[in-house]
Image (cartoon, helix red, strand yellow):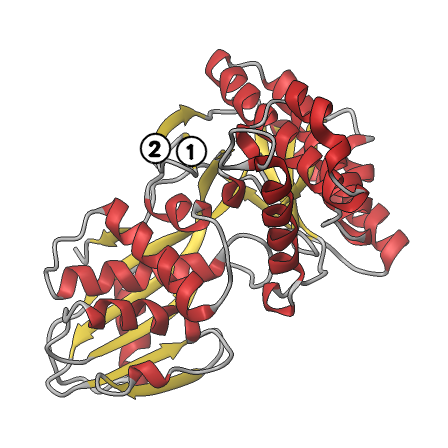
Amino acid sequence: MEPQKLEKEFYTVFDTGGESLHYFFAPGRVNLIGEHTDYNGGHVLPFAVNKGVYVVARKRKDDKVCLYSAQKGQKETFSLRNMEAGVSSGWVRYPLAVLQLLQREKVFSRGLDIYYNGTLPSDSGLSSSAALEAVTALAGNHLFDTGLSPLQLALLCHRAENEIVGVRCGIMDQFAVILPREKRAVLLDCHTSEFSHIPFEPGEYVAVLVHSRTYRSLEKGQYNQKREGCEKSLEILAARLPVNHLCEITPEVFEQYSHLLPPDLRSLVRHAVYEEQRVKKTAAFLRKGNLIEVGRLLKESHLSLQKYYRVTNAGLDILFEEATALPCVLGARMTGAGFGGCTINLVERGKVPYFQETMAEKYSARTGLMPAFYVVTPQRGAHQINAG
């Protein structure tokens, strides 16, 4: 979106007086591979996409904080003095949580007007919530000249979602929308927060997201239940092994000690342990430009999430089955926390129209739903937009 268009939209909601406008963008993210390894101390391999959340922001003269979502058509107003009261549901929880943490550091001397507009489909697994958090943190950081680094902003956004929103997510989403570079994926060690940029230029292939049109809500409890199961498993295994995180365990050690776990927990740990190995192998194959092996690992990841972690659903599994049956697809898997949302597919660039037409026909015939398609390319992370 061009700044001029965003400016017009801003002034349909807010008055034309006040201070100068500033423009920001935070992308959504796709996790190429490494699902549910983040909170288990493992690695992930996400990249930022060419869709996201735009913000127009300015300082106010009073202590009001006014947040408006173009997608929701909602305006929420708070005082700097009562932001801690918060809200119990809805999109505004995410930016408000970030502003609360910034305010605890006494960043704000005055209020803000913030206008949000975006191109991310909600409940798609593309981390629209992390994009909301990141673009809000970036705006606050810039307008009040706090000097927080990108790494510090990512950590603050992660705290906001964990401590205030109440979703016990790992650090991947916030890092994956703030730290990426163009044509690169981010290999992130979720235990140490160390990261490196891995070349991801698919060449004759392209990444295509397919939205299942089935939706999820992490607040319903499934996500936190999985985390609790992993924590319980770690407690059992740490009594016999010198480990602090499940992803420290090698497949060989897991096979030796898996009998200590009840079947439901054993399945969770099996996925985490082997998924960690798949992430490392994928990064190595990307460095070599070996997309055939990357595609094979994507398929393995989906099957593990389906059989062992049990976070796929009928829609995601049908998309996986139909995509991997097509010769033009190197690999596919669900991406995101699961329970709905999208699959990621490596598709021959010249066959994308055929892929979309075929998948739409087959998926709608089996489910009665029409999928949505998004061709995505690795982009830079959250940044300020020059108004020109």
* Spot occupied by residue 152 in the image (x, y as percentages of width and height): 25, 50
Q: Residue at x 27, y 68 (%)?
A: 101
Q: Amino acid at mark 1?
A: Asp
Q: Which quadrant does the C terminus fall into? A: bottom left
* Spot occupied by residue 117 in the image (x, y as percentages of width and height): 40, 68
Left or right placement of residue 331 versus residue 204 in this view: right
Residue 194's label in the rendered image is: 2
Q: Residue at x 33, y 41 (%)?
A: 179
Q: Taking 338 as reference, is 56 above or below it? A: below
Q: Residues within 10 Å of mark 2 (few under 14, many from 20)?
A: few
Residues at badges 1 and 2 in contact (C-beta under 8 Å)?
yes
* Spot occupied by residue 217 in the image (x, y as percentages of width and height): 63, 66
Residue nearer the viewer, 283 or 383:
283
Q: Residue at x 64, y 17 (%)?
A: 293
Q: Quarter of the image holding residue 297?
A: top right
Q: Taking 86 as reference, is 126 above or below it? A: above
Asked if residue 119 shows in the view, the reply is no
Residue located beneath label 1 in the image: 189
Left or right placement of residue 316 versus residue 252 in this view: right
Secondary structure, mark 1, is strand
Q: Residues within 10 Å of mark 1 (few under 14, many from 20)?
A: some
* Spot occupied by residue 150 in the image (x, y as percentages of width and height): 25, 46
Q: Residue at x 53, y 41 (%)?
A: 40
How far apart marks 1 and 2 lie (CA) works out to: 5 Å
Residue nearer the viewer, 230 or 215:
230
Q: Quarter of the image holding residue 86?
A: bottom left
Pointer 1 or 2: first along the chain: 1
